[in-house]
Amino acid sequence: MRGDRHLDKVGPLNRTIIFSSLVLGIVQTADPLAARSKGSAKAPVTVYEMADFQCPACRMFTVTVMPALDSEFIRTGKVRWVFINLPLPSIHPNALAAAEVAMCAARQRRFWQTHDALYLHQDGWAKLPQPRDTLVALAQRAGVDRDKLNACIRGGTARAEVQQDAERAARSGAHSTPSFYIEGGLLEGAPYTPDPMRHVLDSVYAVRTAPRRNPK
């Protein structure tokens, strides 16, 4: 899905952006999102990616754009990347089940491995009438303990966490996937190449790391 503020149409952000974690309802006294975050917790820029595992545009972004961003911004300590679930069950009926599996995998510290497997094999489970066994099998191949995963799903807490994520995304103003909340600014839609997001992140990083001027 493409929002009005698609990243291919957004230039560098030149204004000062003030980050507020309250928009996403995340308390920073602990780090409850660590298991589904990449990069240093001390990175000057934080990106919240709000996505749906059954969304084709989210898959495209993960496969074609994210590797470059990971190499250039996340591994270099410039950006912390956090995944927020925003399933859209009205158009993606298997998205919630996939999100539950991913969140249960996160409890075994295998979120990103499962995340990648779900997107890479999206065509194989997206249209299944009953996708659960296939989703569990993908997570298991990604290193997740099957019995613990099934117990987590049955417990229902993962579903509650996904719903909480969706509420966070709604508070940020996101209505389509993928959407990106970057230091107080919301961008909707996935770029087709790394360049649009690269320009945004470079601009925000420059603002966040600029020397503060002492008032005269």
Image: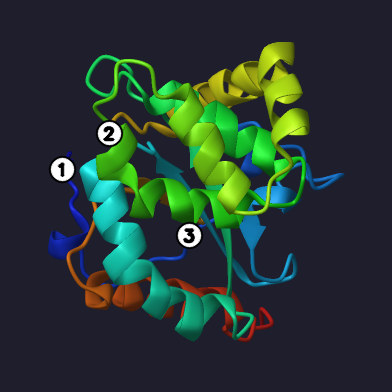
Residue 165, disc: none
For image coordinates 60% across by 18% down, the residue present is 159
**Residue 168: image x %, image y %?**
54, 28
Question: In the figure, is residue 183 to the left or right of 189?
Answer: right
Q: Nearer the viewer, residue 167 or 20?
A: 167
Check if mark 3's residue and mark 1's residue have beta carbons within 8 Å: no
How are the colours assigned in the image?
rainbow
> How many other residues sit within 10 Å of disc 1, few (<14), some (14-19) or many (≥20)?
some
For image coordinates 63% across by 49% down, the residue present is 111
Question: In the figure, is residue 176 to the left or right of 79?
Answer: left
Residue 17, disc: 3
Question: In the figure, is residue 76 to the left or right of 128?
Answer: right
Residue kind at label 2, given as amino acid type? Ser
- Residue 188 visible to the viewer: no
Instruction: Check disc 2 and report the residue beneath it.
Output: 176
**Residue 58: image x %, image y %?**
30, 48
Please, what secondary structure does the residue beneath circle 2 have? loop
> Disc 1 and disc 2: Cα gap in Å?
7 Å
Residue sitting at the far right: 29
Q: Nearer the viewer, residue 214 or 88?
A: 88
**Residue 154: image x %, image y %?**
69, 13
Instruction: Check disc 1 and report the residue beneath it.
Output: 2
Check if mark 1's residue and mark 2's residue have beta carbons within 8 Å: yes
Please, what secondary structure does the residue beneath circle 3 have? loop
